[in-house]
Image (cartoon, coloured by chain):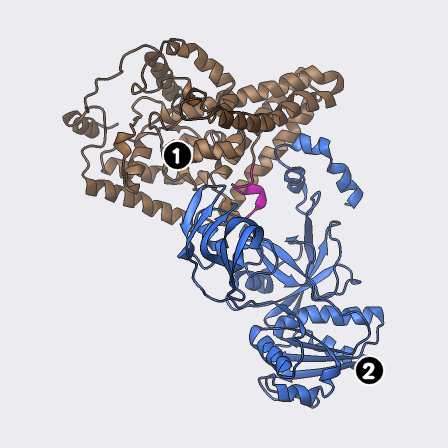
Amino acid sequence: MNAAVQNLTANTTPSRGWRHLSAEQVEAFGAELEAIREEVMNSLGERDVKYIRRILKTQRYSEIAGRTLLFAGFLPPAWIAGTALLSLSKILENMEIGHNVMHGQWDWLKDPALNSSTYDWDNTCPAEQWKHSHNYMHHTFTNIVGKDRDVGYGIMRMSDDQPWKPQYLFQPFYNWILASFFQWGVALHDVEFERIGRGKSLAEATTQLKQIWKKARKQVFKDYLLFPALAGPGFLFTLAGNATANLVRNLWSYMVIFCGHFTEGVEMFSEEEVKDETRSQWYLRQLLGSSNLEGGRAFHILTGHLSHQIEHHLFPDMPAHRYAEIGPRVQAICERYNLPYNTGTLPRQFATVLKRINRLALPGRRRQAAAA
Amino acid sequence: MSSVTWKLLNNPITRALASPLSVDDYLSQFNPLWSVGEVRGRIERVERETADAVTLHISPNSHWAGHVAGQHLVLGVEIEGVRHSRCFSISSAPGDTGITVTVKRNGDGLVSNYLVDRAQVGEVLFLSQARGEFLLPDGNAPLLMISGGSGITPLMAMLRELVHQGREADVVFLHYSNSYADTIFHGELRALADRFDWLNLKLVISNGAAVEGDHQGLFSAEQLLELVPDVAERVALLCGPPPLMDRVNDAFIAQGRDKPAQEQFQVRLTAAAGEGRVSFSRSGLEAAGDAAPNLLELAEQQGLNPPHGCRMGICQGCKCRITQGQVRDLRNGEVRDVQDEEIQLCVHTAAGAVSVEL
């Protein structure tokens, strides 16, 4: 945040970095973003196709190579290389391919293998439920406490607008359990256990759980039984390699995703605040509720370009590799409107996430409710 | 690779290994022709027929189940990485090596222009199996084949098939074309007519002078009687642009006969606007029925991507279940109630509240 914004916000309300904008300015801000979107979407073509085909090839080849090497997993170098390649493949498949394909970023190719309505990813979360909890709930109601289930996944207190409960005292600890089993957390978070009996029927939740198990058991069967069994005497080596690859992918995706919305300075919203929101106000909320990660090209690809969380939230159906190109333009627009553009390196941003988790484990509000 | 290889590669074990992706997702990385079940074909040769038409010689992979003369297929081609699908009649006979598809430039049509100007040897095409009911009639009745422009393609396949079979069927082949330069298969038609007594070729040219033995003008009932005096004794087969098909059908009806067996390759649709609300039950989206010319485009407007092919009511690629509702068939303007029925989204519009399973 630059000094000008800090001054402005300090003069108005300390908790929000946008109240210095008039309604007209907000609309103008939205129009500028809309223009970028229009320009990029109209320029999609062969370059983008080449990119995603290369990613697909890299992912498939690294998976095949990784799983093959794990058959020789009794040799330590083969186990390490195999596990590393399989981890890479799982990260690419979940982040840069699965997540982005299911957003419809590649629907315009009309390739049935990259279609958002039919694609299913190598994750325990069924594609259908993901598209509801993520594409719809999270992207529409981003950072709205009580609506966006990514705010704490129903088990953590990530905003001081969430009332404190004693269980949150343990969140600095079970945060790491969520991180390690992140794909299971993602799979289960649309079930909304805490709403069962309060607006959600047990039958509905049971149906969802059955769908999740139907999906998840395929990965369990493949990674923990079938491939290990094919390895014969190397059963345990393959099993350990596959489990490690799933763990690496879990930790990585957890870290990237938590850095997207829970870093320092990211805003949370209440349902009241977003009533009758215009498209431009929605853009503004997406900007204020997201934060970026800095890094090189390979880093961005491994995050599925969620390192450009701001751009992703502004334009969720734009092919993600374009975010890096428009990032500087989005940042320039933010500077002109004196709006924060939250970005930093992974260690720095993640440190602020951990700070938030630790702080909110304790009762009380992080800041005074000055806006009230 | 042979069909045995595909069977070995497609079983519960390989599918579980690839899950949740498909076996094809991996195979296609090695060779775009490889698939455990889908028909794909490689362009082996591009033969120029006229300034505006080419014949693509395609070798399909082993999933191709063959075709019957007169049938068509849905052909998918990647243009700048984006897949486009259209219907084309197969112009080769079943006995030929590989299959051929003959494509004529269709105005500004993206796919036809691409295939005519830019299709390359080695390119991989995504094919459907052959389909269609426009076939040679059984029995030995004398035939009358009437075609116009690129509508000649399914009839050419039939003619070639008759030659293959050595069936000396009595055929009058009546073909309408803008000019000689525009006549697809011109040389081959002449050669066949010279070689076989049973084939009586009647070429009618609309622009420029006709050479001796050919004719000039457009189709008319009088011209038909003049060129084919025994028309009443012949089983007629028809394929051509809509204006020609209309005139031929009218002439047959005026003579108190049934319309010829026919294949439309351009469909004329009524432009009736949709009415009512359309709800897409799986995605939970809703739209006004008049927001797009047909249900397929309406769904696409909502950001849905239903599978589709020809977009003109032929290939059945966009068939989708309607839970309940009232729809209008744009081919004949008829409105009907449907319940738990699959319809082609591209040639239907809403005529009331409709619930589409998308």
Answer yes or no: is residue B237 visible: yes
> What label does residue A139 carry, if any?
1
The amino acid marked with disc number 1 is: His
Per the rendering, the colour in which chain B appears is: blue
**The quarter of the displayed image where residue A349 is located:** top left
Residue A280 lies, with reference to residue B274, above or below; the image says above
Q: Residue furthest left?
A: A11
Instruction: Give the brown chain's letter.
Output: A
Is there CB contact under 8 Å for labels 1 and 2? Answer: no
Q: In the rendered view of the protein, which quadrant contains the C terminus of chain A?
A: top left
Label 2 neighbour load within 10 Å: few <14, some 14-19, many 20+: few
**The quarter of the displayed image where residue A16 is located:** top left
Q: Have a look at marks 1 and 2 and say if they share a chain.
A: no
Subunit of mark 1? A
Q: Residue at x 44, y 24 (%)?
A: A192
Residue A156 lies, with reference to residue B203, above or below; the image says above
Magenta part, dominant SS = loop
Label 1 neighbour load within 10 Å: few <14, some 14-19, many 20+: some
Q: Nearer the viewer, residue B36 or A293?
A: B36
Residue designated by label 2: B197
x then y, percent, for residue B221: 62, 86
x then y, percent, for residue B307: 56, 49
Q: Residue at x 49, y 31 (%)?
A: A298
- Which residue range is magenta in the image? A110-119
